[in-house]
Amino acid sequence: MVVLNKIYTRTGDDGTTALGSGERRAKYDLRVAACGAADEINAAIGVARLHLAGLPQIDAMLARVQNDLFDLGADFTVPQRDGKAERLRVVPAQVERLEHDIDALNAGLAPLNSFILPGGSAAAAYLHLARTICRRGERTAVELAALPDEPVSAAALQYLNRLSDFLFVAARVANGNGASDVLWVPGQNR
């Protein structure tokens, strides 16, 4: 359990922040950015959940995702190093659960014949926003993983990739199972 008695510490006033390992990094560091992206995704999902009246199945799925995103942040904040005690990590079962949820939601949707523009209902628009933040977070995490001595677990990267797919499908369900999807019309405004 985490106990936070004092919110401000002044330790970040110099432009650094502490990782879960205690190591200090610049606030613009890619590992810090990956943690921040998980937090941003979580906040956007929180807003989307405010608009999910009548969709308890998606709301329950998103509640699990929000908890997983804290696991993901914990995974990013402590670089996995050989010989060190293992910390909280995203595990393949969390990725598999997302796949199951995607399949369950997608089963009731008609196949797409066009790209979808973010919009329709408020819930769908916010889920699309969360999806785009997730894609940015994935790009950041992949860039981090490409650096020498900056390990990122495969499951964490897979989770972000599946999460963006899940958010896309959830947005379609929030749009009346796709009935209110806003379709892209190529060249419409030429």
Image (tube, grey):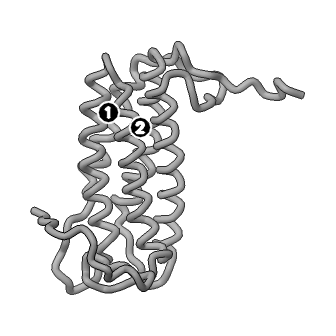
Q: Left or right: where does residue 10 sit relative to residue 110?
A: left
The amino acid at mark 1 is Asp
Q: Residue at x 40, y 81 (%)?
A: 13
Cα distance in 3D space between marks 2 and 1: 7 Å
In the picture, the disc for residue 37 is none
Number of residue marks: 2
Where is the N terminus found, in terms of image quarters? bottom left
* Label 2 residue SS: helix
Residue 60 in picture, x, y percent from top left: 24, 32
Q: Is residue 156 above or below residue 61?
A: below
Where is the C terminus found, in terms of image quarters? top right
Q: Residue at x 29, y 75 (%)?
A: 78
Residue 20 in picture, x, y percent from top left: 26, 76
Residue situated furthest left in the rendering: 1
- Rendering quarter of residue 151: bottom left
Residue 18 in picture, x, y percent from top left: 31, 79
Q: Is residue 60 above or below residue 79?
A: above
Q: Is residue 63 above or below residue 143?
A: above
Q: Left or right: where does residue 86 sit relative to residue 76?
A: left
In the picture, the disc for residue 101 is 1
The amino acid at mark 2 is Phe
* Label 1 residue SS: helix
Question: Which residue is under mark 2?
Answer: 166
Pointer 2: residues within 10 angstroms few (<14), some, or many (20+)?
many
Q: Is residue 94 above or below residue 77?
A: above
Q: Residue at x 34, y 33 (%)?
A: 49
- Label 2 or label 1, whichever comes before in sequence order: 1
Q: Residue at x 43, y 65 (%)?
A: 34
Residue 7 in picture, x, y percent from top left: 24, 68
| Residue nearest the viewer, comparing 125 with 100 | 125
Pointer 1: residues within 10 angstroms few (<14), some, or many (20+)?
some
Marks 2 & 1, CB-CB < 8 Å contact: yes
